[in-house]
Structures are given as structure tokens and as C-alpha cells.
């Protein structure tokens, strides 16, 4: 290992309290209290991992019932209002209580300090607080969704949400409002950490792209989340006291709510996506044994996406009665987001080109990400075109498009990252065969679930409907069949990952032969990550240097 | 944020890094705050432009005297806050304690006056839902176009949300200041460990700046009758 360790950094002579050999963040303390009061970023990441996995399967269960119901045109499984509550619950849980937090709080929490050579995040107590705030918000929302439910959809459009809905709108919004603060805390922590705590020699342009992606996502977390908070406060005030802030009968403007909501909720898509893109950059370089193609371009494309994400929100409102001129501008701006996204896809492809590719499980997920994200991104351009959007607005075309981005993109990326860093987090290897099988099942199941929905949407099947004309049944059954395959693909990792904790073979510090400071520590890492503060001497993906060093 | 006696936290290399991080974190948080107030300011601006007469009519009824006094009180508290930061950095414990207590006193004065103002608004039937008389607004003398009560309500709701959110920030700030007093009395705020005062000072100044925007937006848009003891005609801002 010594030859690999010299790559990228040299140990600095710096005093640290001596560490017991074999001590790591998992075995340094035991008991419930040692977990609930921890300020170790790695343990908080595990707390988030457990919480979010539970929430993912709850949100997935709602999706399962939705797909089962849509097997038949008349929706015989659940009544219409239950169906409304199911898709609302699915959207609310998956967006706010899984996709937004998942990569930053699990992988980001674990890796940001390790990748910059720090002992912890800048504000460890705020980090722990963010988990408590998130969990409280999640419990309130879950309670509201289970005890009566919400039928507004995850978008809470007014005046339905503020005036007419007779369901648990307020408690759900309170839960989302509270969990928003946890997002802000996480984003703030990452930005401060990356600004002030980088190891000596780790300049901004030597940072791994995972960190740049998290930096860009954190900017959005910090700047977009407060606007949602204010939108929710205003809807809450209107709902509780009957003041017409968004009610046209009383002088309010319902479109204003949509502006506020999408000012948050469009950038939020990039909160989900950017960290996953960071993961893909790490995986693609590692398994093609190459430096990333165009490091600076990939880096600035992350920042470009973060900036542009704030300028495109009204493309969700082309049919909401905004002026033609603003629609034109927002359409053009939406096209511009495709540029940085395409830069990333092209650069990953160019990185793979002529690389010595090893088809390990993380790479399979990353390749899945690239394929599905490209399809999701390109159909996004259809929707950014004003004319096409008039036709497919609020249809299954939209559903398919954003599931390609969020599930095919974010969740694929997250799964890839989890498989990539699992040996680092636990010190164990999972089953090679089963994990590759899971990647394949997820990919096939995903395509079968969502590709027919593009067709359904184009043919005119509206989203959120409980029943549909009989001629759509074949495509719906295909979609539901795909969903059941997808479900198997998501449950499978739960088993072999848990199994690996007991029976997995020890992974060693760097099973993939990857560069990056996090791999220079033992697996699982010691409580303070590094015995000595590392000094970084090269850029992040010097696989060529390492290969030549290993030869000697 | 702990009462840990060791000044340097375990995960920092040196004090300079720790200080930089603390201040940086607060600035990022203030960016969040700008967006939260920015959202409500935007909503206010949209309706203010759409319903100018109704908003001016409602603004004219707000208590501009208390609003003005509160502005002076709050700006003075920013001065004492800045002096507390200075006192910590030069190690003048007594001055620090005095300035912190003065800041708390001024903050409490602001909140006390705000409560008096809210109560007077209530007595004047300016609180939507709780105490509001729609008929009162339909015939105002000297206003040509009729004012619609529900639009007046809209203005008043914005007034309560904006000042209420500001007051909530003041209350949080007061709590932080009380914590600082406790720390100062225990001798924990020294030229080496001055960051808590500086960081909370940043927050306090931000809350003051928000008020600087609230005053003209809410109070100064309407025509106000001068108090009888001032020999000037009605003020139109």
C-alpha cells in the first residue's frame, strides 16, 4: 500500500493524540447514547442513511399501490380520494424526505470532510441538529400523511391547498417547513467547510468534482429553501385565517404562489442531481483509470447549473397564464441549462474513451446514470419548447421525464455512490454477483416502467388521474410490470448490504485502487479521519501517476 | 456554541481557522435570511404596485410615531452591539457587560413598544379576522377611487407577517444576547475568544437592517396626519 499512499499527499509532521490500533468510528463507542449524541460526521451520515432508507421504502410503497391501481382502467384497488392521497404522499416523501437530502446528508456528510483532509465538518453540532430537525419534520409529515393524508399533490397549488382541500394540508406543510431548516444547516455546513478547512495544498482547483458538485448544490440549498419556507408560511396564513394572499376572490394572485413554489422547486431538482453527478465523476474516473476529461469544464458546469437553475422556474407555468414574452425568455433560459448538463455527459464519455474499464458494480450504476439522465435531459428540452409543452403539459410525459431525471439520475447515482463507498463506510465488501444483478434489474425495471409513460403522455393520458380510457391499458400494464421489477432491484441491495456487515470479506483501505484522500485512511476510518493532516500535492484524479508507481 | 473551556475545538487546526469559519458560517446564514425576507418583500411589492390606493390607505393608519421611535431605539442598539464587539476584542470586561446589557435593554424597549403598537392597532380595528371593520374602509373622505376592504386586509396581513417575523428574529437575538451576558460574567469572552460576540453582532445588525427596509415599506407609504403640536401640514412621504 505504501506506494499508493504516496500518491497525492505526503504525511505532515503534526502532533495528534496517539490512536489505538484498529480503533475506528464504529467501534470507538457503543450504545444508543453514543449514536444519538454523536457529533462525528461519519456517524451522523449513518443516522441519515438509516432514516432515509426507511423513508425511501415508505415512499416506494405508495408508488407500488399507485402502479397496482393503474393496472386496470377503472382503478378498482383504491377509491379516487385514496388515490389522490397516495400520489401526494409518494411525491412529498420522495422529494423532501428522500431525494433532496439523500446524497448530501449520507455520502456528503461522510465524505466532504474526508475528501478535504479535515477531521470533521465546520459545525459538527449543527450537523447533528440538522438530523434531529429533519427527523422531527419527517415524523410530523408522516403522521399527517398516515392520519388522514393530503390530496393536493406535492405542489400544494393554491387556491386548492389554501381554501378547498379538506385534508391535513397544514400539518404536512409544517413538517416540510421544519425539515427545510435541516437542508439549510447541511448546505451552510458544507460551504463553510469547503471554504475554510481544506488541507494544506488542496487548492480550489485540486478539489475532487464530488466536492464541487456538493458546493454547487449547497449554494442552492442555502438560497432556495428559505423561499419555500416563506411560500409555505403564506399558504398557512391563508389557510388558517382565510386571508386572500393567493385567493383571486379576495384580491390575491394564485400564480404568485406558483412563482414562489417553483423558485424553490426548480432549483431543488438540481439539489437532487448535482451531488449525484459528483458521484458519477468519481466513479467514472476510478473505473476507467483515467484523469477526468476537462476537469475545469466539469467543475464550472456544476456552478453553471447552480446559477442557471435559479433563472428557469417559470417553465413550469407555461399554461398558467403568464405573459408570452416571459414564457419565451424562460423557454430560452431552460434550453441554456442543457449546455452545462451536456458538457458533463460528453466529458464522462470522453473519460471512458480508451480507458482501461473495469465493470465493477459502481460503474454499472454510473453508466446507468449517464444513459437515463441523457434521456431525461433531452425530453426536458421537449418540455422547454413552448409549443410541445402546451400539448404534453400535465401528462404522463412529464411524469416519465422527471422520473428519468430523479430516479434514473439521482437514485442511480446514489446507488452507485453507496456501492462505491460502502467498503469505506463499513470496511466490508458486498456480494459482487448480487450487486451487479441488482444494477441490471434496476436498469431494466426502470426502462420498462417509465419508457411506456412517455408514449402514454404523448397520447394524452393526464397525470394524477385515477382512471383512464381502456385503450391505454397495455402501456399501463407494461409500466406496472416494470415497477415490480424495479421494486425487486431496490429491495435486493437491502439484503446483500446488510448481509455484508456480518459476512462480507474485509475490504482493506482502498479496494478500488482509487485516488482521493478518503481512500488513504483505514476502512472504516478512525474517529478523527486522519492521524496526520495530509498535504496535497496533486490534482484529484492522478490515476496515471499511481499506475506507474504501482508498476515499480 | 458550547461552554467548553478549551477555546480551540478539536476539528480545527488553529484559532485563526476557527474564527474565520465562525464568521463565514454566519454570513452564509445571513444569505439565507436575505432570501427569506426577500421572498416576502417581493410579494409585498407586487401587491403594493397592484393596489396602490388600498395600501396607502392602510399605511396611513399605522402608528408612524412608534415606528420612528423604534427605528431610533434599534439603531442605538446596533451602536451598543458594535461597542460590545470592540470591548471584547480589547479585553474590557466591564464595558462589554454594560454594552451587552444596554443592547438587551434597547431590544426589550423595541419589543415593548411593538406590543403597545399591536395593542393600539387592535383597538383601532386594524387586525384582520380578530378586529376589522370592512365598512370603515368603503367610505374614506378625500379618497376618490373606492378602497376595497379585502385589499386593505392584504396590506395589514403583510404588515403583521413582516413585523412579526422581524420581532421573532429580535426575540432570538435577545436570547443569544442573554447567553452572551452569562458567558461574559463567567469571564469566557476574551480577546482570544471574541467570536461569539462578533458572530451574534453580525446577526443583530442584520435584524436592524431589515427594520430599515420595513419602516418605509410599511409606515411611510401613506399620508400621515401630523401630531397637533407640530405646526406643519399633513406629511406625504
Image (cartoon, coloured by chain):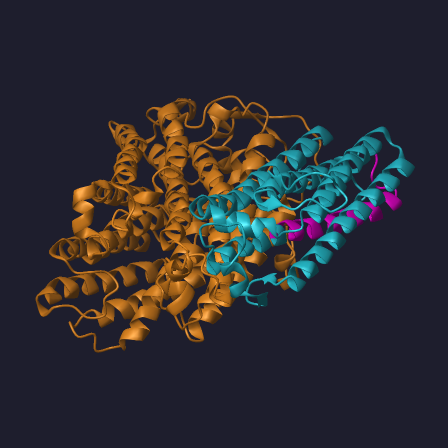
Chain colours: A orange, B cyan
Numbered disc total: 0
Q: In this rendered view, identify the residue nearer to me: B51 or A193.
A: B51
The answer to whether residue A67 of the structure is visible from this angle is yes
Q: In this rendered view, identify the residue nearer to me: A215 or A35.
A: A215
On screen, residue A399 versus residue B156, left or right, reads: left
Q: Quadrant of residue A80?
A: bottom left
Q: Is residue A254 magenta?
A: no
Vertical placement of residue A140 versus A534, above or below: below
Q: Which residue is most to the left?
A: A471
Q: Quadrant of residue A487?
A: bottom left
Instruction: Please name the predominant secondary structure of the magenta segment in the image.
Output: helix
- Is the C terminus of chain A in the top left, top right, bottom left or bottom right quadrant? top left
- Residue under the point 67% across and 37% down: B22
Q: Which residues are magenta?
A: B165-191
On screen, residue A249 versus residue A478, left or right, reads: right
Vertical placement of residue A124 versus B128, above or below: above
On screen, residue B163 versus residue A335, left or right, reads: right
Q: In this rendered view, identify the residue nearer to me: A425 or B167.
A: B167
The answer to whether residue A509 of the structure is visible from this angle is no
Q: Which residue is most to the right?
A: B94
- Residue under the point 80% across and 43% down: B103
- Residue under the point 43% across and 73% down: A146
Q: Is residue B177 magenta?
A: yes
- The percent position of residue B18, horizontal first and vertical second, equals 69, 34
Q: Quadrant of residue A20?
A: top right
- The percent position of residue A286, horizontal first and vertical second, equals 37, 34
Q: In this rendered view, identify the residue nearer to me: A453 or A211.
A: A453
- The percent position of residue A498, horizontal first and vertical second, equals 43, 60
- The percent position of residue A452, horizontal first and vertical second, equals 15, 56
Amino acid at each position: 500500500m505504501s506506494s499508493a499512499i504516496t500518491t497525492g499527499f505526503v504525511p505532515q509532521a503534526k502532533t495528534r493524540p496517539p490512536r489505538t490500533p484498529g480503533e475506528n468510528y464504529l467501534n470507538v463507542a457503543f450504545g444508543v447514547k453514543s449514536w444519538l449524541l454523536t457529533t462525528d460526521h461519519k456517524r451522523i451520515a449513518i443516522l441519515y442513511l438509516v432514516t432515509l432508507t426507511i423513508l425511501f421504502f415508505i415512499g416506494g410503497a405508495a408508488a407500488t399501490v399507485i402502479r397496482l391501481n393503474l393496472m386496470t382502467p377503472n382503478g378498482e384497488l383504491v377509491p379516487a380520494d385514496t388515490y389522490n392521497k397516495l400520489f401526494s404522499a409518494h411525491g412529498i416523501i420522495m422529494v423532501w424526505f428522500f431525494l433532496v437530502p439523500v446524497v448530501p446528508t449520507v455520502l456528503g456528510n461522510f465524505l466532504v470532510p474526508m475528501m478535504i483532509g479535515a477531521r470533521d465538518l465546520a459545525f459538527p453540532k449543527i450537523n447533528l441538529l440538522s438530523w434531529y430537525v429533519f427527523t422531527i419534520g419527517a415524523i410530523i409529515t408522516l403522521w399527517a400523511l398516515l392520519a388522514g393524508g393530503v390530496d393536493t399533490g406535492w405542489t400544494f397549488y393554491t387556491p386548492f391547498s389554501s381554501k378547498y382541500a379538506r385534508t391535513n394540508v397544514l400539518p404536512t406543510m409544517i413538517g416540510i417547513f421544519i425539515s427545510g431548516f435541516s437542508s439549510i444547516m447541511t448546505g451552510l455546513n458544507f460551504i463553510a467547510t469547503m471554504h475554510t478547512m481544506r488541507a494544506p495544498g488542496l487548492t480550489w482547483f485540486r478539489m475532487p468534482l464530488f466536492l464541487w458538485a456538493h458546493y454547487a448544490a449547497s449554494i442552492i440549498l442555502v438560497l432556495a429553501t428559505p423561499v419555500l419556507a416563506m411560500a409555505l408560511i403564506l399558504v398557512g396564513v391563508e389557510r388558517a385565517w382565510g386571508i386572500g394572499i393567493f385567493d383571486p376572490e379576495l384580491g390575491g394572485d394564485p400564480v404568485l404562489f406558483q412563482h414562489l413554489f417553483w423558485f424553490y422547486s426548480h432549483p431543488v431538482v438540481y439539489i437532487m442531481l448535482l451531488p449525484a453527478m459528483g458521484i458519477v465523476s468519481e466513479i467514472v474516473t476510478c473505473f476507467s483509470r483515467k484523469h477526468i476529461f476537462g476537469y475545469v469544464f466539469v467543475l464550472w458546469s456544476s456552478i453553471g447549473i447552480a446559477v442557471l437553475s435559479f433563472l428557469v422556474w417559470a417553465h413550469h407555468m407555461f399554461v398558467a397564464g403568464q405573459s408570452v414574452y416571459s414564457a419565451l425568455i424562460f423557454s430560452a433560459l431552460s434550453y441554456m441549462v442543457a449546455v452545462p448538463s451536456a458538457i458533463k455527459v460528453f466529458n464522462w464519455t470522453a473519460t471512458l474513451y480508451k480507458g482501461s474499464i473495469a465493470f465493477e458494480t459502481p460503474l454499472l450504476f454510473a453508466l446507468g446514470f449517464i444513459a437515463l439522465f441523457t434521456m431525461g435531459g433531452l425530453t426536458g428540452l421537449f418540455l422547454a419548447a413552448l409549443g410541445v409543452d402546451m400539448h404534453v403539459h400535465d401528462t404522463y410525459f412529464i411524469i416519465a421525464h422527471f422520473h428519468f431525471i430523479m430516479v434514473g439520475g439521482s437514485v442511480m447515482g446514489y446507488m452507485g455512490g453507496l456501492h462505491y463507498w460502502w467498503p469505506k463506510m463499513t470496511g466490508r465488501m458486498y456480494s459482487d454477483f448480487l450487486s451487479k444483478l441488482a444494477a441490471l434489474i434496476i436498469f431494466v425495471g426502470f426502462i420498462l416502467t417509465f419508457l411506456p409513460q412517455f408514449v402514454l403522455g404523448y397520447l394524452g393520458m393526464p397525470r394524477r388521474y385515477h382512471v383512464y380510457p381502456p385503450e391505454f391499458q397495455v402501456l399501463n400494464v407494461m409500466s406496472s410490470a416494470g415497477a415490480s421489477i424495479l421494486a425487486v432491484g431496490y429491495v435486493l441491495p437491502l439484503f446483500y448490504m446488510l448481509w455484508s456487515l456480518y459476512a462480507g470479506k474485509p475490504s482493506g483501505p482502498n479496494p478500488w485502487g482509487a485516488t482521493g484522500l478518503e481512500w488513504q485512511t483505514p476502512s472504516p476510518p478512525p474517529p478523527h479521519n486522519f492521524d496526520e493532516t495530509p498535504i496535497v500535492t496533486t490534482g484529484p484524479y492522478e490515476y496515471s501517476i499511481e499506475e506507474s508507481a504501482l508498476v515499480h | 456554541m458550547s461552554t467548553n473551556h478549551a477555546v480551540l475545538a478539536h476539528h480545527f487546526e488553529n484559532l485563526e481557522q476557527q474564527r474565520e469559519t465562525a464568521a463565514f458560517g454566519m454570513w452564509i446564514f445571513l444569505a439565507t435570511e436575505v432570501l427569506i425576507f426577500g421572498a416576502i418583500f417581493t410579494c409585498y411589492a407586487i401587491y403594493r404596485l397592484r393596489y396602490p390606493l388600498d395600501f396607502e390607505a392602510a399605511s396611513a393608519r399605522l402608528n408612524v410615531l412608534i415606528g420612528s421611535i423604534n427605528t431610533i431605539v434599534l439603531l442605538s442598539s446596533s451602536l451598543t452591539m458594535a461597542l460590545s464587539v470592540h470591548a471584547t476584542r480589547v479585553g474590557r470586561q466591564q464595558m462589554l457587560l454594560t454594552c451587552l446589557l444596554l443592547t438587551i435593554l434597547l431590544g426589550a424597549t423595541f419589543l415593548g413598544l411593538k406590543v403597545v403598537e399591536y395593542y393600539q392597532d387592535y383597538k383601532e380595528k386594524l387586525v384582520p379576522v380578530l378586529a376589522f371593520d370592512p365598512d370603515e374602509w368603503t367610505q374614506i373622505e378625500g379618497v376618490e377611487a373606492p378602497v376595497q376592504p379585502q385589499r386593505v386586509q392584504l396590506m395589514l396581513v403583510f404588515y403583521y407577517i413582516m413585523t412579526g417575523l422581524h420581532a421573532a428574529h429580535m426575540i432570538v437575538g435577545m436570547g443569544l444576547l442573554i447567553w452572551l451576558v452569562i458567558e461574559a460574567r463567567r469571564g469566557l469572552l476574551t480577546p482570544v475568544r471574541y467570536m461569539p460576540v462578533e458572530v451574534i453582532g453580525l446577526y443583530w445588525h442584520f435584524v436592524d437592517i431589515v427594520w430599515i427596509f420595513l419602516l418605509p415599506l410599511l409606515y411611510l407609504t401613506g399620508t400621515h396626519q401630523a401630531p397637533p403640536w407640530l405646526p406643519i401640514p399633513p406629511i406625504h412621504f
